[in-house]
Each structure stands twice: as structure tokens, then as C-alpha cells.
Image: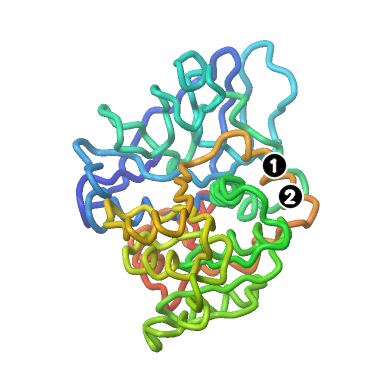
């Protein structure tokens, strides 16, 4: 079977892998769709992000869905032919962080397509994968493309949860790529009374507006666009920083009222923080990293129509056209979410 490896920056290659048989508690998933994530793009463009670097060829991909083609011995609950969203989160369940109830902080996490540990954890951009049954959530009623969006939606459910109570709050979202737009959808569901969204590209701000943002601001065209929200000591309650840009973090913190909350979701490396502002306004700066139990919730929210991800799905390419897919995903003037179609192999 074919799999898509990143060897270094701007060096992606399709290569053959042997097929595997499922063991107890495992299933074989014939991959159907895989979404190109921001971290995949970091590996493609830069060979990693922050201190995380590719040190060996690694299969990319962790936003995936497919059809079960075989099940392991004595497995119940899943059958051949089931459409499933496959969670890339595989905590050990035995380390101190897992036992503290923090599986997303697992010391031995085997998250698909991650160069954080070495040897790297191979990803899911392959025609077939053997997965644990516990990773697979039935996605009845969804398309494979929608089911593959369970992973980024889970990231956003976790991030909005990190902010605490959202009901009635005035919210700022900086960075309106797929994560930012999904945060808007989730924050609205969580009861945000007003959502202000910023970015430096008009195309993605159109998606933010369609997702429910009350105000969209292009801060490249108007660097002072957030000035009205900085009045007094700030006028907004929660800042979801989804860009990983230092300037966006600082601008958002200036808009928060005293004892507001900033949740950092964007990953691009270390940033300087305006510590005096953070201290003087008693702002809570909270990290948000991956997810775990939110994955099944994400699938259910799409199945019930509480969250509609279809407008974000802008481009699909066969696996063989991975170069075009990654080039398109890198062009924010054209694309929101780009997926690979493994069924077209």
C-alpha cells in the first residue's frame, strides 16, 4: 500500500508499506479521507515547528476517516463496512499524567504524525491503517470528508473548554484558518454573546463571518482595527489565539478586560508575552494542547447538526496529487480545508 512520507522540508514522497493484520482489539481501516493540518504544513515547509524537527522519514496525517475492512479476533461493536472517524490520540493509560486524568498530556503519547518523540510516531496518510478499536468512532450519517473533520473540531472543543464559562461572554478569535473558524462555531454553541474575528486575509474572514462572527477585521489593512476594544482596560472577556503569531497574541491581550482569559491554540514556536500587561490586568493565559475525550463528542455534534463543517471543505485531491494538495493548502487566498482522497488511489 502507499503512504505519504515527509523526509525534510519540501520533500514529500509516496512509498510502499507492507499491509498489516489486526490483532486483538484492533481493526483495519481502509482510509477514505485525510485532512491536511497546519502541523502537516509546518513539516512540509519548515521540516517541523519550534524545537520539533524531522529526524527521520515520517508518514504525515492525523485528520482521517475510513471504512473498516477487517476486525481482530473476538471484537464486538465494530464491523466491516462501518464508516469511522479515527482518533489519532493514543495515550498509554498508565503514566502519571494519564492517571491524573490528563490523557492529552500522556508521557508516552503515540499521536499520529508527530515528530515530538524519536523514533517519530508514524501518521495516517496511508491507504490502510491498523487502529485500536477504541480510537474508532462510528460516523453513521456523515460523509467521509465530514468524519475526517472530527480531529480539528476536537481541538476546538478542548480549547473552548479551557476558557471556562463562555455563556454571555464577548469573545475575540485571532487567526481564522480552520481552527479559528471551528472555534467560532464552538464558541457560538457555547453561548458567546459576541464574537470578533481578526485575520490578515479577506478570504478566510469571509468564512469567519459565515460561521457566525459578528465582526470581522482585517488587521493587515487596518492595524488599528481593534482600537475600540482596547478602551479603558479592555472590553472583551475571552481571547482565543489561533494564529500562533506574537503580534496577534499581544493585540488580543490588550483587548481583554481585567481578569479576562486568553487561550493559546496556535502553534508556531516560542513567543514573547507582554508580561506587565498580563500581570497588571490579572489575565489568565491558558494553553490548549490536542484533546482526547472530546473526539466522540465532535462526531456526535456533526451527526446531530449542531456543528456543520461542510462549508469549510474547499478542496479535495487524490493521494497521487499530494504536491498540488499541499500547494493549495498553503495558499490561504484559495483554500480553507484541503483533504486527500484515498479512495481515488
Q: Position of residue 226 (x, y in %)?
A: 47, 79
**SS assignment at label 2:** helix
Apparent side of residue 205 relative to residue 53 in the rendered image (left or right): right
Residue at 62% over, 34% down: 293
Q: Position of residue 243 (x, y in %)?
A: 41, 63
Q: Position of residue 186 (x, y in %)?
A: 65, 57
Apparent side of residue 6 relative to residue 2 in the rendered image (left or right): left
According to the picture, the residue beneath numbered tag 2 turns out to be 301
Position of residue 301 relative to residue 87, above or below, is below
User: In the orientation shown, which residue stands out farthest toward the bottom?
Assistant: 221
User: Label 1: how many residues lie within 10 Å, few (<14), some (14-19) or many (20+)?
Assistant: some
Labelled disc at residue 112: none
Dividing the picture into quarters, in which one does residue 162 lie? top right
Residue at 56% over, 71% down: 235
According to the picture, the residue beneath numbered tag 1 turns out to be 297
Residue at 37% over, 44% down: 60
User: Label 2: how many residues lie within 10 Å, few (<14), some (14-19) or many (20+)?
Assistant: some
Residue at 58% over, 12% down: 24
Between 268 and 238, the one nearer to me in the picture: 238
Residue contact between numbered discs 1 and 2, judged by CB atoms under 8 Å: yes
**Label 1, label 2: how far apart the Cα atoms are:** 6 Å
Task: Say how many tags the image has.
Answer: 2
Which coloring applies here? rainbow
Apparent side of residue 227 relative to residue 4 in the rendered image (left or right): right
Dividing the picture into quarters, in which one does residue 37 lie? bottom left
Between 331 and 129, the one nearer to me in the picture: 331
**SS assignment at label 1:** helix
Quadrant of the snapshot with the N terminus: top left
Q: Position of residue 86 (x, y in %)?
A: 58, 37
Amino acid at each position: 500500500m502507499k503512504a505519504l512520507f515527509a523526509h525534510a522540508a519540501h520533500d514529500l514522497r509516496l512509498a510502499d508499506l507492507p499491509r498489516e493484520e489486526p490483532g486483538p482489539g484492533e481493526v483495519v481501516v481502509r482510509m477514505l479521507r485525510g485532512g491536511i493540518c497546519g502541523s502537516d504544513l509546518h513539516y512540509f515547509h519548515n521540516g517541523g515547528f519550534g524545537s520539533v524537527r524531522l529526524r527521520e522519514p515520517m508518514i504525515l496525517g492525523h485528520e482521517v476517516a475510513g471504512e473498516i475492512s477487517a476486525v481482530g479476533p473476538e471484537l464486538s461493536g465494530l464491523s466491516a463496512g462501518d464508516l469511522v472517524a479515527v482518533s489519532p490520540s493514543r495515550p498509554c493509560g498508565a503514566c502519571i499524567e494519564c492517571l491524573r486524568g490528563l490523557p492529552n498530556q500522556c508521557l508516552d503519547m503515540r499521536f499520529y504524525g508527530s515528530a515530538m518523540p524519536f523514533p517519530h510516531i508514524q501518521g495516517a496518510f496511508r491507504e490502510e491503517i491498523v487502529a485500536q478499536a477504541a480510537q474508532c468512532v462510528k460516523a453513521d450519517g456523515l460523509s467521509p470528508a465530514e468524519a475526517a473533520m472530527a480531529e480539528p473540531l476536537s481541538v476546538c472543543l478542548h480549547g473552548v473548554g479551557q476558557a471556562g464559562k463562555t455563556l454571555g461572554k464577548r469573545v475575540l478569535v485571532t487567526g481564522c484558518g480552520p481552527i479559528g473558524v471551528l472555534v467560532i462555531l464552538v464558541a457560538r454553541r457555547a453561548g458567546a454573546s459576541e464574537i470578533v474575528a481578526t485575520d490578515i486575509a479577506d478570504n478566510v474572514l469571509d468564512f469567519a463571518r459565515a460561521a457566525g462572527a459578528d465582526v470581522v477585521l482585517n488587521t493587515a489593512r487596518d492595524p488599528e482595527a481593534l482600537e475600540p476594544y482596547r478602551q479603558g482596560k479592555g472590553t472583551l472577556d475571552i481571547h482565543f489565539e489561533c494564529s500562533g503569531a506574537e503580534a496577534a497574541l499581544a493585540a488580543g491581550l490588550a483587548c481583554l478586560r481585567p481578569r479576562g482569559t486568553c487561550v493559546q491554540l496556535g502553534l508556531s514556536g516560542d513567543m514573547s508575552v507582554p508580561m506587565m500587561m498580563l500581570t497588571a490586568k490579572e489575565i489568565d493565559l491558558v494553553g490548549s494542547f490536542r484533546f482526547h475525550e472530546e473526539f466522540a463528542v465532535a462526531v456526535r455534534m456533526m451527526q446531530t447538526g449542531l456543528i456543520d463543517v461542510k462549508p469549510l471543505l474547499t478542496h479535495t485531491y487524490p493521494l497521487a496529487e499530494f504536491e498540488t494538495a499541499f500547494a493549495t493548502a498553503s495558499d490561504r487566498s484559495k483554500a480553507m480545508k484541503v483533504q486527500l482522497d484515498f479512495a481515488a488511489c
